[in-house]
Image (cartoon, rainbow, N blue to C red):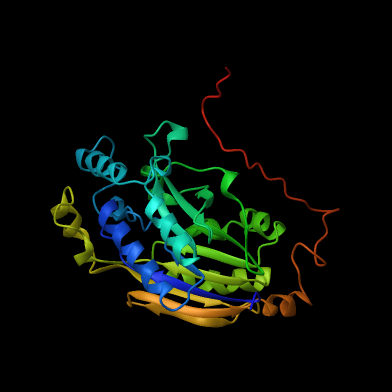
Amino acid sequence: MEHTLKIALAQIAPVWLNKTETLKKVENSITEASKVGVELIVFGEGLLPGYPFWLALTGGAEWNKTVNKELHAHYVNNAVTIEKGDLDAVCKLAKAYKMAIYLGVIECPLDRGGHSIYASLVYINQDGNIQSVHRKLQPTYDERLTWAPGDGHGLQVHPLKKFTVGGLNCWENWMPLPRAALYGLGENLHIAVWPGSDHNTKDITRFIARESRSFVVSVSSLMHKDNFPENTPHLNKILEHAPEVLANGGSCIAGPDGEWITEPVLHKEGLIIETIDFNKVYQERQNFDPVGHYSRPDVTKLMVNRERQSTVAFKS
């Protein structure tokens, strides 16, 4: 059954800004998905260890403000450093269960000095190997106060049974050129990860599916006022302005015809499981293929720089 793929959308809440406890929730979700034969599981943007909600609640743009500096330091202390093995346990589970994984993390990479953080989408294959780490190209609005901009190195796709899977973070799904880069690599299963809420997923999911004639899987997290741990720095200031619901989910799946397979799911924590059929891609590409028979590379062509960017290049 190479043409079918069983997928799980892990719509869960983080243990906010707690890397260790959120990792446990991720690992539990993977184990739960394995019991029903899931072959690909997807988690939301920055789930590990959580989205920087405080920026909109504590005057995040105020210059040199102690509360923001201390929360940022707490955030970095709970970020993921892949080079130090922070995802080793997740990779072992992927291998043990023969399950591919897309996981949204806040990454603190050593190749950029080890002090700045990025919203990164990590792909782990069914052999338990990390195949790509896509750092969000352009943080959105107040995210720029805590996340650094990424590069094109992670604009990669991966074979998964008969599918070719790729992914983008949150609002970069609205950027036509990164989408086109993935289409040009043969993507036919597009993963869009979000911090949460159907206002993000309800339109763009179907739009990308119809534009690309691909399956599109949007996965969001949940976040409720009760999900802020008691040991969070400046918790009282955060809760003073926090709504009861900060992220309501909205995870969903659209087929290559742009119609819903799974409509946005709201306020429900757990796994959303569906099996998709690759043949639907060929059926919809019959009349439109954005980088194949319905393209004009002699007229318009995209150039992509996939170098991993760094400030320093050393020569021995």
Residue located at (74% from left, 76% from top): 282
Q: Is residue 41 above or below residue 80?
A: below
- The residue depicted at 54 percent of the width and 64 percent of the height is 191
Q: Position of residue 176 (x, y in %)?
A: 63, 57
Image-based side of 119 in relation to 276, left or right: left
- Residue at point 30%, 50% (across, down): 55
Q: Nearer the viewer, residue 134 or 61?
A: 134
The quarter of the image holding the N terminus is: bottom right
- Of all residues, the one furthest to the top in this rendering is 316
Image x and y of residue 101, in percent = 48, 62
In the image, residue 161 sits, relative to residue 117, either above or below, namely: below
Image quarter (top left, top right, bottom left or bottom right) of the C terminus: top right
Q: Quadrant of residue 43?
A: bottom left
Taking the image as drawn, is residue 115 in sight? yes
Left or right of 69, for residue 43: right
Task: Give coordinates of residue 86: x percent, y percent.
Answer: 37, 47
Closer-to-camera residue (97/61): 97
Question: Measured along the vertical axis of the image, is residue 85 above or below residue 45?
Answer: above
Residue occupying the far front of the picture: 96
Residue depicted at 45% across the width and 63% down the height: 96
Q: Quadrant of residue 75?
A: top left
Residue 224 location (% of width, % of height):
25, 67
Q: Is residue 37 left or right of residue 286?
A: left
Q: Is residue 96 above or below residue 82?
A: below
- Count of numbered tags: 0
Does residue 197 appear anywhere in the picture? no
Judge left or right: residue 301 versus residue 19: right
